Image (spheres, rainbow, N blue to C red):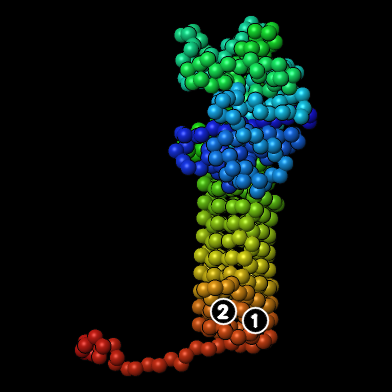
Amino acid sequence: MNISIAIMAAGLGTRMKSKIPKVLHKLSGFEMLYHIIKEAKKISDDIHVILYHQSDLVQKEMNKYFKDINYIIQDHEQFPGTGGAIMGVNPKYNKLLVLNGDMPLLENDDMSIFAKQKSSVVMSSFTCENPSGYGRVVLDANHNVKKIVEEKDASEQEKEINLVNAGVYLFSTTFLKENLCKLKNDNQQKEYYITDLVKIANENNIKVKTVVVNADTFMGVNSKYHLSIAEILMQRRIKRRFMEQGVLMRLPESIYIESSVQIEGESVIQNGVSLLGDTKIINSTIKSNSVVENSTIQNSDIGPMARIRPDSNIIDTHIGNFVEVKKSTLKGVKAGHLSYLGDSEIDNGTNIGCGTITCNYDGKSKYKTIIGKNVFIGSDSQLIAPVVIEDDVIIASGTTVTKNIKKGSLAINRAPLKMIEGFYYKFFGKDNG
């Protein structure tokens, strides 16, 4: 699509009350600015991000994801405001769509609606029951935009208008080249306003059209309270898409799924589950209050109350309650409860008893535990890595494994049980009678 996109991300974001730039606050696992750039790239190869406040930090974070973005530092000292922000943009195409970096719920379909407009100036608007605080959009008899009136400048009649400015604009590049230089800052804030371009267009008999949009989708995030609302809306969107593809969710409002997660097949996600990072769930059940992070789960069931940490690959496996798996590959394994399996490879038919620990860290380095097929690990066993347990092995309960175990062996190193009769009464000084 032949359209350029400018994303305004220069603001101080003081209402966030944070040292973190507003556009770097995260939503469903990623920064707000990331979400809008990702969607913008679906319709344009010419994206400009306008920065000012903590510009180096914002650019550094976005460079982790995108390599072909044009960053522009706003001349905030001489040209502050939304109008000043786009003065440094040099669009590649004959249309420029202007977005805000604090609108993380926008999707490419929403942007495409503007790209299809023919007018030289197009703005966005939405209706709301309580328009207090918004700039009112005044239309003429032909539904063209006559003007935008800020609330402090609106008459009593204009304050009754419930069509308000949503803050997204489309301009022809020719119009901008001819009229950006006409912006003035003769207002109380001494700033250059992008809304004044609407006034300039009308003065030059250029019709200004408006696209009426969804208020939730075009909401701007200005505070951490707004961020929480946007999080709820994005989570509903993410989960709805998965459920429409056949995923079953129990009490979906209690589930948290980051936007990079993939779920396939007839998977079941129960209440209280968190799916994080580049997690992929395939034909599996994730039970209540389990956490899966940057891992792949296939044809398996996890939990309840299990934790799968990054870089784990779990296939055809049962992971029970209070089991933690980290950076491990499990194929056809049963680990029913209360175990830690870190930096390990465990093969088909193996049973991990309650209380088993792979002791993978010596205080300096991490080491690997390799367990073969059809191994029975008894309860309360410690496997001191690096160690290899071959196929068809039994590890007796309470065993500490410090050596490699050969195929077909029994490993047991319990201390002999010692009993001292009458010791209880001697120790506590109580009469045996």
Residue type beneath disc 1: Ile
- The x and y percentages for residue 276 are 59, 52
Residue sitting at x 50%, y 34%: 13
Task: Confirm whether residue 34 shows in the render.
Answer: yes
The image quadrant where one finds the C terminus is: bottom left
Q: Which residue is mark 1?
A: 389
Up/down of 184 relative to 205, above or below: below
- The x and y percentages for residue 287 are 56, 57
Left or right: 215, with 373 as reference point: left
Q: Which residue reaches farthest front? A: 78
Q: Are marks 2 and 1 in contact (CB under 8 Å)?
A: yes
SS type, badge 1: strand
Residue sitting at x 51%, y 65%: 322
Q: Which residue is mark 2?
A: 383
Along the line of sight, the residue nearer the viewer: 152 or 334: 152
Residue type beneath disc 2: Leu
